[in-house]
Image (cartoon, grey):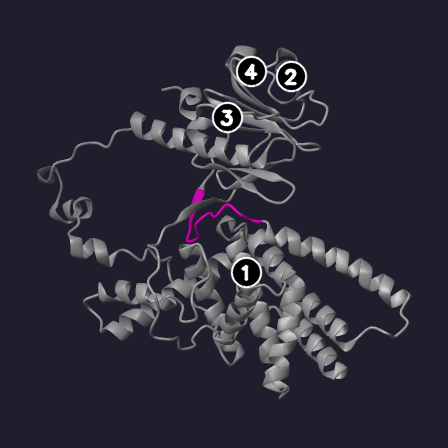
């Protein structure tokens, strides 16, 4: 089956042209712009990223490669035989194409939903084609030493013991040794994705070295854009309000502004300095953004508690800030979400060490589940994994797995315990809140 047959019909997909219905003028413009050695008959799919339809910017897929060009950037080009993953992440205004876990182009003209469906189909086709082209060799146990035979045909017990595929241990931060709850609900099984560490070249197919990632890809990534946009809009209105201030703003409005500003700033800092900078594709999604928000809430709650602020005032303060940040109304669903976020933040711990340790576990467990983990970190799944280790008592095996998970997660995200700016922002926000009352 060819790629086009596998993809099937795309429906009414403006700016996406499929063979044999590719306009020649667009194809020739695209070829001249970023893939001069491709012929018109080679093109399977053409994505036009131009407003006026000249197709000088966009993506071309042939039977052997995928190439394209973004405005003001060099062209990119990948041989399909070297593509291990290709997918689109859709946000509010743009759809971003990733090849081998690397961002290659942002698309604004074609439909985001259609692009997600298209490249999911392309990725499935490539995976099936690779499996069909490279059948597994037939090996008999007699041809191998006993120890190698065991690796190919593992026993159920040994396979279970290898389930938590953890990264090589490194020395963790001293902050990452807090005790954790012992009970929780079940979660989905562990999966991993691959992350690429090199940039593609502009003119030749790229064969990139890949490293494993513990985090799964989830498609929706709208919340971070919304927070960033709201933060910029709020900053403008706050500036205007300060200039035209008549000192009539209520304490509640000032409180919401302070808390919302801290939460937005901290969430964006975590995303930019740890996820974007370290290129953790699996944490570029709404689930991870909500975990950053929970951590930010917990951090401010801890700062206020250390100042001996009345617990009722802390709850009121955090509620006002979260409602403003997420634009929550008084509906039942909004009140339920608010209560859940505050509860999860409070359950993270009563000191900074517990807070940071729990952050890494929560991020990992929520990513594997595809939604927010519960207040006891979905510990049943970890206990199940620990039970496969017959060499250690259950509690020791559980602590070992948790430690390995945290170390591997810190290694991929980075150590947030050393971020002094978050601590400074929390102290400053707490001071402003106390001054208001």
Kindly indicate whether the residue at mark 4 contacts the one at mark 3 (C-beta within 8 angstroms).
no
Judge depth for marks 1 and 3 and give the one in front: 3
| Residue drawn at (46%, 70%) of the image | 358
Q: Judge the density around disc 1: few (<14), some (14-19), many (≥20) Cα neighbours within 10 Å.
A: some
State left or right for residue 47 relative to residue 5: right
| Residue 38 - label | 4
Q: Which segment did they paint magenta?
A: 210-221
Judge depth for marks 2 and 3 and give the one in front: 3
Label whose residue precedes the other's in the sequence (2 or 4): 2
| Residue drawn at (49%, 37%) of the image | 87
State left or right for residue 343 relative to residue 432: left
Q: Judge the density around disc 3: few (<14), some (14-19), many (≥20) Cα neighbours within 10 Å.
A: some
Toward which corner of the image does residue 367 lie, by quadrant?
bottom left
Based on the picture, tell me whether residue 399 belongs to the magenta stretch. no
Q: How far is disc 2 from disc 3 in space, using C-alphas?
A: 19 Å
Judge depth for marks 4 and 1 and give the one in front: 1
Q: Residue furthest front?
A: 331
| Residue 26 - label | 2
Mark 2, secondary structure of its residue: helix
């Amino acid at each position: 089956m060819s790629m086009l047959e596998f993809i099937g019909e795309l429906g009414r997909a403006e700016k996406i042209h499929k063979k044999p219905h590719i306009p020649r003028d667009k194809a020739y413009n695209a070829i001249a712009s970023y893939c001069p050695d491709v012929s018109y008959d080679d093109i399977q799919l053409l994505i036009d990223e131009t407003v006026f339809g000249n197709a000088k910017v966009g993506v071309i897929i042939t039977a052997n490669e995928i190439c394209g060009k973004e405005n003001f950037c060099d062209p990119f080009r990948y041989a399909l035989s070297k593509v291990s993953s290709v997918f689109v992440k859709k946000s509010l205004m743009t759809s971003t194409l990733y090849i081998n876990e690397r961002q290659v182009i942002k698309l604004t003209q074609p439909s985001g939903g259609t692009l997600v469906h298209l490249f999911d189909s392309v990725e499935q086709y490539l995976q099936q084609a690779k499996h069909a082209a490279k059948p597994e060799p037939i090996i008999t146990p007699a041809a191998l030493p006993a120890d190698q035979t065991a690796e190919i045909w593992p026993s159920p017990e040994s396979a279970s013991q290898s389930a938590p595929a953890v990264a090589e241990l490194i020395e963790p931060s001293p902050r990452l040794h807090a005790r954790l709850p012992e009970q929780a609900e079940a979660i989905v099984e562990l999966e991993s994705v691959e992350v690429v560490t090199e940039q593609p070249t502009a003119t030749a197919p790229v064969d990139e070295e890949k490293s494993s990632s513990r985090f799964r890809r989830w498609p929706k990534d709208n919340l971070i854009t919304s927070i960033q946009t709201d933060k910029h809009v709020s900053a403008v209105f706050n500036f205007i309000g300060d200039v035209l201030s008549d000192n009539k703003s209520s304490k509640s409005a000032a409180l919401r502004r302070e808390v919302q500003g801290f939460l937005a700033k901290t969430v964006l800092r975590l995303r930019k300095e740890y996820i974007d900078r370290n290129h953790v594709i699996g944490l570029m999604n709404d689930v991870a953004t909500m975990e950053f928000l929970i951590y930010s809430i917990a951090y401010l709650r801890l700062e206020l508690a250390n100042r001996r602020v009345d617990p009722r005032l802390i709850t009121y303060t955090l509620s006002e800030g979260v409602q403003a940040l997420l634009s929550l109304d008084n509906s039942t669903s909004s009140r339920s979400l608010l209560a859940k976020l505050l509860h999860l933040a409070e359950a993270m711990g009563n000191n900074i060490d517990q807070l940071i340790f729990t952050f890494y576990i929560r991020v990992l467990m929520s990513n594997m589940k595809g939604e927010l983990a519960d207040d006891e970190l979905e510990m049943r799944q970890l206990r199940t994994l620990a039970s496969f280790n017959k060499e250690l008592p259950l509690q020791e095996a559980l602590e070992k797995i948790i430690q390995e998970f945290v170390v591997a997660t810190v290694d991929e995200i980075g150590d947030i315990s050393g971020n002094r700016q978050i601590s400074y922002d929390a102290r400053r926000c707490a001071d402003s809140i106390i001054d208001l009352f």
